[in-house]
Amino acid sequence: LYAGRIMEIGKPEDVYLHQGNPYSKALIESYPSIRNTKRKVNGIPGSVPDMLKLHDGCYFADRCSVAEDICHKEEPPYIELGQGHMSLCHFASEFYSKSGNLKVNVDETGSDNFYSKPPTDVPLIHGDNLAKYFTHTTSQLSGLFSRTGAKLVRAVDKINLNINRGEIIGVVGESGSGKTTLGRTFLLSHKPTSGSLVYHPSTRDIEELRGKEDERISS
């Protein structure tokens, strides 16, 4: 997750061993090893973008080592790299084709089986084009006397995510990328600004559920 957007989604072995997004690789190389204390940690240069001044292109472009002009000007599409594996990047296919040869600083898992028990195919919750915006006012006076004083912070934006029963979803991202807001929005601690959130086996939007059904969701 970066600036409220899902940059890459897939199974653990996809994201860790065969990345399709420069941000994923940068994250993997930026954390220390608990087994090799002398291993070099490569931090991501720069800082997360100002959520009040997001540009039209890829939000990670200013910090990306492989960014080109199009990355700064046009919003990237989601590109499918395999079953359940997608990346928000103009050059996802090219990056993915090279990632098998890229050296990443990850500890050996010792096994190709990332799940002791595979998740089911039974849906539990589905978020469609989910967004959560907050209104930011620079000061009380600017809010009272200026029409431009209040600005939107797009904490979570255009999120499409399915969670099945028995499935564990890991959300990885830098501080301020929107992880907590995403989780609270899925739990309805934050009311979504737009989009839909459907709890199964009900086929209704969670916002429509009340009373006893609400108690079941909150538990």
Image (tube, rainbow, N blue to C red):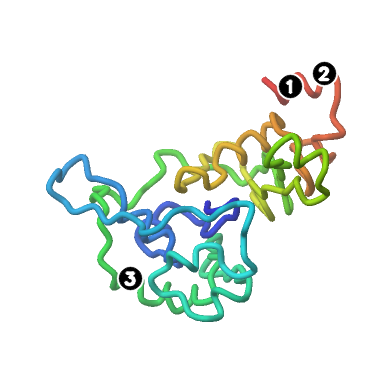
What amino acid is at disc 1? Answer: Arg
The tag earlier along the polypeptide, 2 or 3, is 3
Which one is nearer the viewer's eye here, 159 or 126?
159
Q: Residue 30's x, y, as percent? A: 31, 52
Q: Reply above or below: 130 against 97.
A: above
Quarter placement of the C terminus: top right
Q: Residues within 10 Å of mark 3 (few under 14, many from 20)?
A: few
51 relative position to 92: left or right: right
Q: Residue 155's x, y, as percent? A: 64, 46
What amino acid is at disc 2? Answer: Lys
Residue at position x 79%, y 47% in the image: 194
Secondary structure state at the residue bearing disc 3: loop
What amino acid is at disc 3? Answer: Gly
Q: Quadrant of residue 27?
A: bottom left
Q: Residue 60's x, y, as percent? A: 50, 63
Rounded to the nearest whole Å, what is the CA distance between mark 1 and mark 3?
44 Å
Residue at which label 2 appears: 212
Residue at which label 1 appears: 216
Q: Residues within 10 Å of mark 1 (few under 14, many from 20)?
A: few
Which one is nearer the viewer's eye here, 203 or 97?
97
Q: Reply above or below: 112 against 65.
A: above
Rounded to the nearest whole Å, what is the CA distance between mark 2 and mark 3?
50 Å
The tag earlier along the polypeptide, 1 or 3, is 3
Secondary structure state at the residue bearing disc 1: helix
Residue at position x 67%, y 37% in the image: 186
30 relative position to 7: left or right: left
Name the disc covering residue 100, or none.
3
69 relative position to 162: left or right: left
Rounded to the nearest whole Å, what is the CA distance between mark 2 and mark 1?
6 Å
